[in-house]
Image: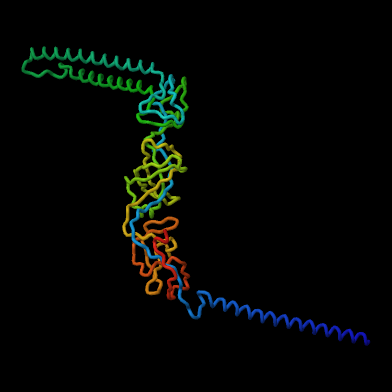
């Protein structure tokens, strides 16, 4: 019994010790929490949004100088031909000759015969048509002579009366004149068909594809390849309506063109057309540039197009960091921040070009926290154009 009582007292002492440890831990957590809260509050009081005694906002400013500037923009376009022309004969027959230039990529001159169809059937058709013309002319001549004799006989008998139409054979003459006209039209058509046995185009062209070969039977109106006019090449590039308006591009303006790898140098070209609608996917408007003679670019080539606007006076060249929003800046005036709307005329990776305005003590180029907008301003550093270029 004595041992049981002793064990009970030992257990009771252990429970008290454990409780004491728990109380100490709770007190430590509370004290630590209070300390951390005070530290955070002190740190927060030193930040821009929680200062009880607000200090001045320290900024760097830029004082620009007005200058002339020609805005520019670089576009990417693709070389295309105005249209792909089908190599399609207008008459049928067997191919008797094929030009060696009728190969993909070959250049052909205006009027150069690309292939020839057997001409014999068309030569015979022309001979028949010409014979019909000769026959109609002969019969008409004979009928007119007969009508003239009948008319003379009529006036000998009836000198005071005009000869009737039937006596003068007017219906027969009119019918033969119509027949002669039709015969001449048939002869002209036969002559055209004979000329069409030699296929050519009346402009310089480049062959894209061809399936024409000697001995092949071709039919009129069937496509046997494609070509394009070399003087119809153009670059189609997309530009945003905003940039188009900003640059003031017009038909006839000169641009600078280079291939995508810039391996063939640059050359100048002219804008020949501005698209009438925006692309439904890109929301860009087409700028169409005609390629000059001698430009060694083929359809499908990507090209870099440098476009420039009209020269503008009184322009500020500012660091890009000066923009507060897309069309406004902060200036320091009377030791306060003042937001000023600006007219952006050009922009690149490092600078923005705006129309000149009153900058007061300078344009802010350092970051301005929103919570500091109402504070007084202290200028730490003033930069000038020679410092920013």
Closer to the camera in the image, 354 or 335: 335
192 lies above or below 302: above
141 lies above or below 355: above
Q: How is the image coloured?
A: rainbow
Asked if residue 181 lies left or right of residue 146, the reply is: right
Q: Position of residue 345 (x, y in %)?
A: 36, 57
State how many labels appear: 0
Q: Position of residue 265 (x, y in %)?
A: 42, 41
Q: Position of residue 11 (x, y in %)?
A: 85, 83
Closer to the camera in the image, 194 or 131: 194
**Going 34% across and 62% down the picture, which residue do you hit?**
356
Residue extending farthest right? 1
Closer to the camera in the image, 375 or 247: 375
Asked if residue 257 lies left or right of residue 52, the reply is: left
Residue extending farthest left? 160
Quarter in which the N terminus is drawn? bottom right
Asked if residue 317 lies left or right of residue 163, the reply is: right
Q: Quadrant of residue 318?
A: bottom left
Asked if residue 265 lies left or right of residue 189, the reply is: right
Q: Quadrant of residue 85?
A: top left
Quarter in which the C terminus is drawn? bottom left
**Going 34% across and 50% down the picture, which residue do you hit?**
249
**Going 79% across and 81% down the picture, which residue do you hit?**
18
């Amino acid at each position: 019994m004595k041992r049981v009582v002793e064990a009970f007292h030992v257990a009771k002492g252990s429970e008290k010790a454990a409780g004491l440890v728990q109380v100490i831990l709770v007190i430590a957590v509370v004290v630590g929490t209070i300390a951390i809260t005070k530290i955070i509050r002190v740190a927060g009081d030193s930040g821009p949004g929680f200062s009880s005694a607000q200090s001045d906002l320290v900024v760097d400013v830029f004082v620009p100088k007005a200058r002339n500037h020609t805005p520019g923009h670089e576009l990417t376009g693709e070389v295309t031909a105005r249209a792909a022309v089908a190599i399609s004969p207008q008459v049928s027959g067997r191919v008797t000759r094929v030009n060696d230039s009728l190969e993909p990529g070959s250049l052909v001159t205006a009027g150069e015969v690309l292939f020839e169809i057997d001409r014999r059937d068309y030569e015979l058709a022309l001979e028949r048509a010409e014979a019909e013309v000769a026959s109609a002319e002969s019969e008409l001549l004979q009928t007119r002579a007969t009508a003239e004799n009948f008319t003379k006989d009529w006036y000998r008998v009836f000198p005071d009366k005009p000869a009737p139409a039937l006596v003068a054979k007017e219906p027969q003459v009119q019918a033969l004149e119509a027949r002669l006209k039709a015969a001449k039209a048939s002869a002209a058509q036969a002559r055209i068909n004979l000329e069409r046995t030699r296929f050519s185009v009346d402009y310089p062209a480049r062959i894209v594809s061809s399936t024409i070969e000697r001995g092949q039977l071709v039919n009129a109106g069937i496509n046997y390849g494609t070509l394009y006019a070399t003087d119809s090449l153009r670059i189609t590039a997309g530009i945003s309506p905003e940039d188009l308006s900003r640059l003031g591009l017009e038909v006839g303006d000169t641009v600078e063109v280079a291939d995508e790898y810039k391996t063939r140098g640059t050359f100048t070209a002219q804008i020949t057309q501005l698209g009438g609608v925006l692309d439904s996917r890109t929301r860009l408007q087409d700028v169409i540039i005609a390629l000059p003679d001698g430009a060694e670019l083929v359809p499908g080539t990507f090209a870099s197009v440098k476009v420039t606007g009209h020269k503008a006076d009184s322009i500020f060249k500012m660091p890009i960091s000066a923009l507060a929003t897309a069309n406004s800046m902060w200036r320091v005036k009377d030791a306060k921040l003042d937001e000023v709307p600006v007219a952006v005329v050009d922009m690149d990776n490092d600078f923005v070009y705006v129309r000149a305005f009153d900058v007061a003590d300078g344009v802010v180029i350092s970051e301005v926290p929103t919570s500091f907008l109402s504070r007084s301003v202290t200028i730490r550093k003033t930069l000038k154009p020679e410092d920013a270029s």
